[in-house]
Image (cartoon, rainbow, N blue to C red):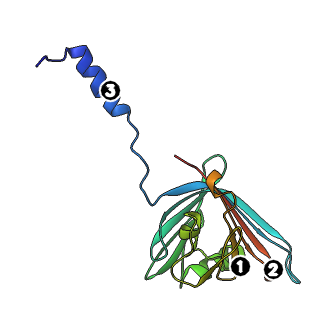
Amino acid sequence: MRRLGPTAAAALWLAGCATVPPPPPDLLSGRIAVRVEASDDRAPRAFSAGFELRGGAEAGELRLSSPLGTMLATARWSHGGAWLVTAAGETAFEDLDALSRAALGEALPLRALPDWLHGRPWAGAPSRASAQGFEQLGWRVGLAQFADGRVDAVRDTPPVVTVRAQLERP
């Protein structure tokens, strides 16, 4: 068997160092936009950010960042509750519904979000197939553009809430 010369060995070593490991299988990332329509007592609200989502319904972490990459907030959850970390500090909540209600003024289905972004209903609640995706928890989840990394969810009960996610594909 022939031995590699020092240059070839160094090139192989550097190539191994340059390899970028694949993201963890439970990591989802991209851009997310949330719009809450006006109601009787509130003006419309909108929010968009980059996101990284790890975990699932029982435990996980959602990081939100500005277009320049500045961390805006991190939501963490487990069986013991939910926590929101911002520049102002950390706040504990009973659950993800309470956290999203405090942060956005409306409860969002954050426990179901990891499954929805994978293009499937959450196992924790009944769902019904529709022509463009499925319905679950009072939301219409649209998967018509899922092959392009896009998932849309709309809650039609007032105030109407729309969540749009554009996933980054590896």
Residue that badge 1 annotates: 106
Amino acid at pointer 1: Glu
Q: Which of marks 2 and 1 is nearer the N terminus?
A: 1
Kindly report the distance in space between the C-alpha atoms of the residues bearing marks 2 and 1: 9 Å
Residue at the front extreme of this rendering: 131
Image marks 2 and 1: residues in contact by CB distance under 8 Å? yes
Amino acid at pointer 3: Leu
Q: Which of 23 and 77 is in front in this view?
A: 23
Q: Which of marks 3 and 2 is nearer the N terminus?
A: 3
**Label 1's element?**
loop
Kindly report the distance in space between the C-alpha atoms of the residues bearing marks 3 and 2: 55 Å
Q: Residue at x 56, y 79 (%)?
A: 96
Q: Which residue is drawn at 69% across and 77% down?
A: 139
Answer left or right for 134 relative to 35.
Answer: left
- On the image, the x and y values in percent for residue 35 come to 77, 67
- On the image, the x and y values in percent for residue 88 come to 60, 66
Residue at the left extreme of this rendering: 1
Residue that badge 3 annotates: 14
Residue that badge 2 annotates: 159
Q: Which of 103 and 145 is in front in this view?
A: 145
Amino acid at pointer 2: Pro
- On the image, the x and y values in percent for residue 44 come to 84, 71
